[in-house]
Image: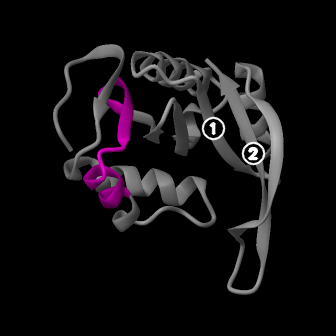
């Protein structure tokens, strides 16, 4: 892990140096976490991979992919000890500001139908449910879960 200046809240770009710590958070939050390879691919593909640092502590992160006049949020995570404290809304606000700098018109995402907490955070920020994707997320080798498609107009 890199040494960070002690500032209240700031973002840094994800590098391979942070992957071990990030993967611990990813595995503690999700039943089907992203792999090291998923994050390395995101870095390699020049997706936005940003870590939210609180002082010197990795608090959350997001991965987003730019498209034509839109941004697709691929991974959005707040570490368990920091959930329900406003960090998610802070990260969404930062993502929206970044998206505006590249003239994006929309932010899109999918969220598991069972992830009510995340759905409420996205809804509180202003995302709207616009559809569903059937059998989108894996639950096990034989079961899948639907996703709710949400969008936010910038």
- Tell me, yes or no, whether the highlighted magenta stretch contains residue 45: yes
- The one nearer the camera, 67 or 10, is 67
- The one nearer the camera, 80 or 68, is 68
> Which residue corresponds to the image point at 29% horizontal and 50% vertical from the top-left?
43
On residue 108, the disc is 1
Q: Which residue is mark 2?
A: 149
Q: Is 40 rendered above or below residue 92? A: below
Residue 26 appears in the figure: yes
Marks 2 and 1, the one that precedes in the sequence: 1
Quadrant position of residue 114: bottom right
Q: Residues within 10 Å of mark 2 (few under 14, many from 20)?
A: some
Q: Position of residue 119 (x, y in %)?
A: 77, 38
User: Is the C-beta separation of discs 2 and 1 under 8 Å?
Assistant: yes
Q: CA distance from mark 2 to mark 1?
A: 7 Å
Q: Position of residue 148 (x, y in %)?
A: 79, 48
Magenta span covers which residues?
Answer: 39-57
Please give left or right for residue 143 compared with residue 43 in the image: right
Q: Is 9 rendered above or below residue 41? A: above
- Give the residue furthest to the bottom: 142
> Which residue corresponds to the image point at 49% horizontal and 25% vertical from the top-left?
95
Q: Position of residue 141 (x, y in %)?
A: 68, 85
Quadrant position of residue 35: bottom left
């Amino acid at each position: 892990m890199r040494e960070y200046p002690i500032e209240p809240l700031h973002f840094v770009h994800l590098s391979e140096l942070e992957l071990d710590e990030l993967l611990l958070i990813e595995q503690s939050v999700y039943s089907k976490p992203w792999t090291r390879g998923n994050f390395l691919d995101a870095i390699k593909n020049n997706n936005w991979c940003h870590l939210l640092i609180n002082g010197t502590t990795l608090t959350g992160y997001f991965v987003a992919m730019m498209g034509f006049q839109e941004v697709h949020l691929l991974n959005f995570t707040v570490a368990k000890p920091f959930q329900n404290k406003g960090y998610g809304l802070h990260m969404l606000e930062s993502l929206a500001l970044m998206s505006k700098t590249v003239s994006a018109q929309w932010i899109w995402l999918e969220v598991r139908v069972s992830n009510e907490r995340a759905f409420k955070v996205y809804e509180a920020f202003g995302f709207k449910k616009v559809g569903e994707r059937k059998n989108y997320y894996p639950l096990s080798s034989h079961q899948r879960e639907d996703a709710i498609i949400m969008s936010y107009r910038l």
